[in-house]
Amino acid sequence: MGGWTTRDIPEQSGRIAVVTGANGGLGLVTARELARAGARVVVACRDAGRGQRAVELLRGEVPDADVTFRRLDLGELRSVRDFAASLPYDRVDLLVNNAGVMAVPYGTTADGFETQFGVNHLGHFALTGLLLPRLLAAPAARVVTVSSMLHALGKVDLRDLNSLRSYGRWTAYARSKSANLHFTHELARRLAASGAPVVAAAAHPGYAATGLTAGVGGAATRRLLLAGDRVLAQPAEAGALPTLYAATAPGVRPDSFTGPALAMWRGAPARSWRAPWTLDDTLGERLWDASARLTGVTCDLVDRAG
């Protein structure tokens, strides 16, 4: 991958990209650079005011940007369905599952799921499944799901997906990010079995200042994390590079995991280490089946090869 930068993004004219959480942080940078390369970008986020401001900002930075806002609340399955049903395109060339919450106090989504599992994993699982016919209609579509290097701190517990037995905010976050990698792995397997020309890949930003820490813990914890963001973290522009690489670079392999080259922390995009359990076929299939049952979205291509 070398010193891959945004200058290496191939021409994206004619491609339609949906980026969740594109109102700020990594998502905003991802949307901006895709638009700069010529893609038609849908800014998908929960807050209409922030979404419209993001569109205005993008058009200010990229005067010829083709960007629109559409409301999407990943914590409400009805909103996910409404978004997919109202999207005015027959095909989607790129879906970037970027939005997420991190280490929040225990809570539940509108549908009763633990917030981090519900938003970070189930919302994106449902969105991908609902957009799958349009991804399959594109000649070379990609689904890029943003995980985290912190996925290694938590293995998915199929007996307690909603953390009803016990809740630790960082453990729940790590489990949701492991779930993102399980989803990518199983989606890639099912796409391969069906022969569909869609690449499912994952990425992570390393340690990047993305704004997620603003809602973490008490005041003292937030001050500490914000200080770390200023001193140790790379900016969002650098943190978005692995996502942009996975989304646009030629030769990206299905089920690949791209992150910063230097100790998974910072630097140019490179192949990243992932916890072995995220490559477990049985665990991935069982989580897939549970996710389909919980969301009511089958996300089916073909039955997975045995």
Image (cartoon, rainbow, N blue to C red):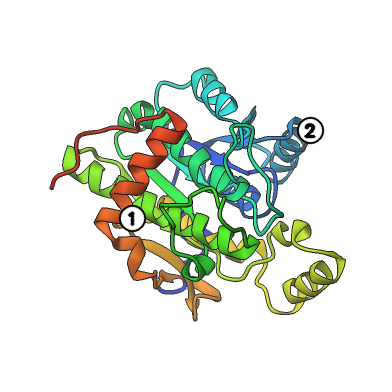
Which secondary structure lies at badge 1? loop
Residue linked to disc 1: 250
Instruction: State the mark number for residue 267.
Output: none
The outermost residue toward the left is 306
What amino acid is at disc 2?
Answer: Gly
Q: CA distance from mark 2 to mark 1?
A: 35 Å
- Height in image: 229 above or below 146? below
Q: Quadrant of the N terminus?
A: bottom left
- Height in image: 93 above or below 186? above
The outermost residue toward the right is 219
Q: Is residue 7 visible?
A: no
**Could you tell me which residue is drawn at 59 percent across and 58 percent down?**
166
Residue linked to disc 2: 49
- Height in image: 224 above or below 147? below
What amino acid is at disc 1?
Answer: Pro
Residue 73 placement (x, y as % from top left): 63, 33
